[in-house]
Image (tube, rainbow, N blue to C red):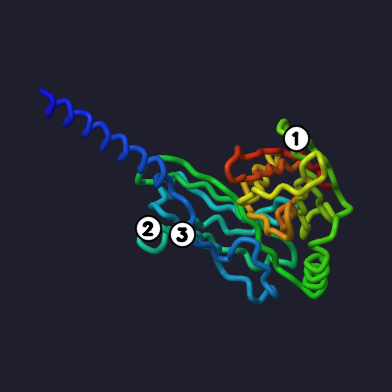
Amino acid sequence: MNSIVITFFAILFIMGNSLSLLQVYGHASPITYDPSPNEIIDSIQSVPDKVTISFTESPEPRASSIKVVNSNNERIDKNDLQVLDAEKSLSISLDKSKVVPGTYTVDWIVLSKDDGHITKGSYVFSVADDSIQNQQQQVQQNSTEVSSGYSKNVTTPDNMILTFDISPNKVGQNTFNLFTTHTNGTAVENIRNVFLEFNNPTKSLGPIADTMDKIDSGKYSSVGNYLSQNGTWEIKVTVQRIGDYDINQQFDIEIK
């Protein structure tokens, strides 16, 4: 009897672990992008003919899509979704006549043939001219300075102060700074990672994800074209701490 009971619980343990693995590794997640997220393409002539995304699982093309829009939320793709590379990559052609220097958002949604789950996301890339390249260099040079376009302080329930800054706080290239301190003014030291997630619900854009760079103790910064259109953006900041709960704080930003 004891051996039967042990065998029964062993089977349950194996099944439970199998289900856990399916939950962890399931869904069609992006592996590679072309153009890549936050890439700045140096000229219109260098823009690829297609946007291509490869996934961990096979997408169902009849229930999947890729949409590429400019900063006015106008499509600049040819709406000709194709499956490539052993049915794990999707691509869509760009209408090169509509491509001008500026910021573009790639919005994708995929139904996995393997597990039937839907995943979605967005990312941005830019086509540069001299003025955009100069702007990028200027923004990067000032990435460690306190921004002036937007700034807000939030005190968390466990007495941690988040100061979130955006400069210049407009459509296109911006610097995002996060300062984390205790209420006594000392920097928060036990931070493993800080993540940003951008969503613009009215334009159906997002989530656009980014990981901030550590500049100093309690100070994190990121540069990118994530605010790719005007409207209300929901920016979720996740502070992942060592030996403590994660902190999640949303900032609602109006971009005109």
> Is residue 40 or residue 218 the one in the foreground?
218
Q: CA distance from mark 1 to mark 3?
A: 42 Å
Residue at the spot 68% in from the left edge and 68% down from the top edge: 40
Labels 1, 3: front one: 1
In-image side of 93 versus 164 (left or right): left
Say what secondary structure mark 1 lies in.
Answer: loop
Residue 125 location, quadrant: bottom right
Residue at x 59% of width, y 46% of height: 242
Question: Disc 2 marks which amino acid?
Answer: Glu
Q: Residue at x 41, y 48 (%)?
A: 60
Q: In the image shown, does 100 or 150 lie closer to the viewer?
A: 150
Q: Is 188 drawn above or below residue 91 in the view shown?
A: above
Q: From the image, which quarter does the N terminus lie in?
A: top left
Relative to residue 91, is residue 180 drawn left or right?
right
Q: Position of residue 245 (x, y in %)?
A: 60, 37
Tag 3, which secondary structure?
strand
How far apart are the alpha carbons under marks 2 and 3?
9 Å
Residue 57, placed above or below residue 250: below
The label shown at residue 144 is none
Q: Position of residue 158 (x, y in %)?
A: 71, 33
Cα–Cα span, label 1 and label 2: 50 Å
Residue bearing the label numbered 1: 159
Residue tagged 2: 87
What secondary structure is marked by label 2? loop
The residue carrying mark 3 is: 54
- Asked whether 33 or 99 is in front, the reply is 33
Disc on the earlier residue, 1 or 2 = 2
Query: Relative to 198, is 44 above or below?
Result: below
Tell me which amino acid carries mark 1.
Asn
